[in-house]
Image (cartoon, rainbow, N blue to C red):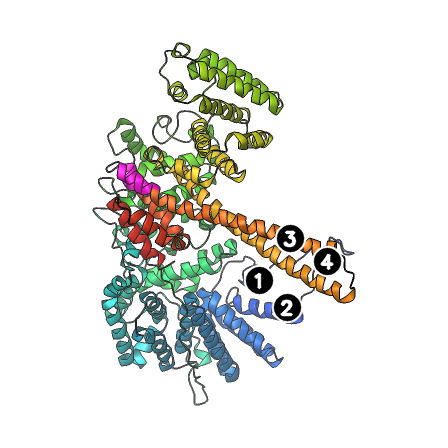
Amino acid sequence: MSGQRNYRNDRRSRGGGYRGERNTRHDNGGGYGGSGGYFEEEKPAEFVKQEQLNLLVYTIADQFTLKQSLEYVCTGILREWENGYHELVCATFKECIANVPHKVHIFGLLTAVINKKDPNIAAAIVRAATATLQDALTSANFRTVKLTLRFFAELVASSVIQAKQLLVLYKILLSVLHEPNLNPQRADAFVYAVLGSIPWAASPLSTSIPEELDTMLATIDAYIQSRPALLQQHGLSAAKEALRSYRDTDVEPYPQLDRLETLWQQVCQLKQVDQWQVNVLEKPVIPEYKLGEGDDWTFHEVEGVTVSGAPVKFNYQPVFWVFDDSVQTPENITIKLPPATSVARYILNDMVNDVVALFSHNHKETTRILYYLNNWLNAEYLKNAEYNHMASIVEQLFANLFSLPVPAERKMYYTTLLIDLVREDLERVPKVLGRAVRTLFSRLDSSDGSGGMDVELIQRFAEWFSIHLSNYGFVWKWADWNDIVKADADGESIPMSGQVVFVRETLERCIRLSYYDRVKGMIPEHWPGSNVFPASAPHPEYRYASAESCGDEKLFQVVQELKGALERKAPVDEIESKLSDIQTYASTRTSADVMDMDTSTSSAINHLSPTDLTLDAFLQTLLLNGSKSFSHTLNIIERHLSLLKRLLSAPESKLLLINTLSAFWSSNTQFLEIVLDKMMNYRVADVKSVLQWALSADVLASHGAKGWLWSVVRSSLGKSERRVGEIDKRIAELDASINVENGNTMQVEETSAAADENGVNGEVDRKQEELKKLKDLRVGAEKEWRDGFIFVFQAFAQAFSAVHSDLIISRYALGMFRNLAREHGKEISVVKFTIEEMVFNSPTGVDDRVRSVWEEVKSVLLCA
């Protein structure tokens, strides 16, 4: 292929693209220079030179033909080398090799051009790459291991090192397969890194040392054959089951293989079917350079590396496909991609994943690289085969978003990238994205509705879709889902199918992101009032709005007096007097006082004791007084915070508080989440009471398939964990401060025998007393945190023992229980033995479904 190819045709600025760049402009004390600009902090000359070198190499081939770029960059490298910046040149290559995955072939070619002009510099680059590999092995950074091996593979292709040198590296890495008591996670990580680099050197390896290559592959094959038994032996076989994207389905959308199994299939096809030809990779050739030719050409040796014993973790989630082979049909030309068993598909997907991971600090640069990714591959091959690399990008962004137990980056990052890509190309990307949504929607349920997509992924799918739609006026072909909504309303389908849950969750989030009438105007007219969209806008449900609603004329009157006192901001004494009046009446009222009405609110009130009725009336009226906005709610809670804490000190009253909140905001779950969170912040409610309410069998049966409930549970568990962290931070700060004060005390004593004991020493004593209180507080906070996780398992075990066939419990609640355990693996590992003893070794027994999830979770804990 000609070296004159213009790799980049876009004319956008290259600024801000390099991974290592940081914004170093500071407001230097708020002063202004004579020109009116901010003073800029002066950078060390070496730092500036490093930035210049980084940008020089990073932007290679961005604007000019490859040959022009190679000449320009090579000249710059030679100049800086002659100027004595040897370490900076090596540091630049180390940084680019590890963090710019789409240009690895150009970095290899650049090294070959440098080798032709000055072999000493090329030798230094090879040593720098070896050091990068060693550092990555030591820290168990296997993404960098893989990318560095690819660089070495490109050095083989560019005749900088010989094929046998790369094979030596492979043998060192694969030596872990012969370790005693082999850990499968460790073995999988090393094998995956080796297999992930082979396509970049497939041709030279297969032509120059075919026997040695076959021997190495035979070693890997032997390991792959023994792998299932090894995973079983180490308790990891259930990890894949715990991390499945689809479960309990009669027909899986595609084989559920983990990433090592998938890559091994692809490499085997590369050998057996493709004859080691990797057409998707760009292999530029510049004939006039005559690389590797002549007696004076220098091949370099690669120093050996050592395999460290650092702990290694491997994710066993099955590979997530959107556009698998089943949807690769002639009519779907917009999503045509290489077959899933092809190594070309692996290269496309893996390059997308690396770019997304390594450029996560700059979503604009990530979008730019992804959009033009075909320019760094064999664009001619992709064009002739009619492959749409944008489909691979969309697929992998969903795969990252749906990563289990948790995504590597914030979910909003992937959402932003998809929005950026749509804006970049309004012609191609929306078609691919629309096809992806429809494909995923079709896979939400099994044929009987008892299984399908993992319920946590359904929630993530709905969350992403709602945010995406909010950027485009909520425009969607909603009528395409009319049958689902109609069937659900008529009782002709499974009421809580994954598709119904997805649509309902999407629309609820759309209302939160906008407002009810706006979203209502975008959906079909018959949807409001169905199971996917409420009949009215979110509003408070005040039990004491009228005599009819509370079913008692006198009760209504005394509550109205309380309401008036709260509205005019009466003093606490008067509020307490009104509460006393309510309790007095509630204690003396008879059945004759209660209206003959059968409403849900009056029924709920009639079952309350006098004390609970008084509390309920106070809380409901307080919430009504602040229901105008969230800030109003906070203001009125803070105004009566001391009274609330006094009235709600008992555990039973805290549970009543949460029941009252959930009833009042039953149609506005966003407010419910926020107010519950604030009540825990104020210590009016506690974590256990919130969990006790949320995980009760009745609440699970009613709301187990609703995302807001699990958001409350997550928030509660996270709050107790963060509280421990905050106390730890304060303890560390006090410890450091006390050490400084003690040092000051010693200095005072050395200079003055009559040191003021009430000065420095008094401050130290005060801080030590505060430290003691904090440590006592930490004991309580840690107990609350531990008890919270233990209670989650106890509550689920109890809920499942009571209900056996309910779909919401068996699919959605069980699925969210599984997800809570998956994503809090590190925390649960701390109390694992306590949970085992208190819950799963209990003489009362545990439902088999809960026990099965626990076995899955224990397997995932080994990978956490």
Whole-angstrom CA distance, mark 4 to mark 3, is 40 Å
Which residue is denoted by mark 2 in the rendering? 48
The secondary structure type at the circle numbered 1 is loop
Depth check, mark 3 against mark 1: the one in front is 3
Q: Residue at x 38, y 55 (%)?
A: 829
Magenta-drawn stretch contains 161: no
Which residue is denoted by mark 1 in the rendering? 21
Instruction: Indicate the position of residue 132 as horizontal and vertical percent values.
Output: 47, 73
Left or right of 725: which side holds 246? left
Question: What amino acid type is highlighted by mark number 2?
Answer: Val
Which comes sooner in the sequence, label 3 or label 1? 1
Which comes sooner in the sequence, label 4 or label 2? 4
Left or right of 327: which side holds 349? right
Residue situated in front as seen by the camera: 434 or 763: 763
The secondary structure type at the circle numbered 3 is helix
Depth check, mark 4 against mark 3: the one in front is 3
Whole-angstrom CA distance, mark 4 to mark 2, is 17 Å
Which comes sooner in the sequence, label 2 or label 3? 2
Which residue is denoted by mark 4 in the rendering? 39
Asked whether residue 289 appears in the rendered view, the answer is yes
Question: What amino acid type is highlighted by mark number 3?
Answer: Lys
Q: Which residues are magenta?
A: 795-813
Magenta-drawn stretch contains 797: yes
Which residue is denoted by mark 3 in the rendering? 767
The secondary structure type at the circle numbered 2 is helix
Q: Quadrant of residue 522?
A: top left
Which comes sooner in the sequence, label 4 or label 3? 4
Location of the N terminus (image quadrant): bottom left
Whole-angstrom CA distance, mark 3 to mark 1, is 42 Å
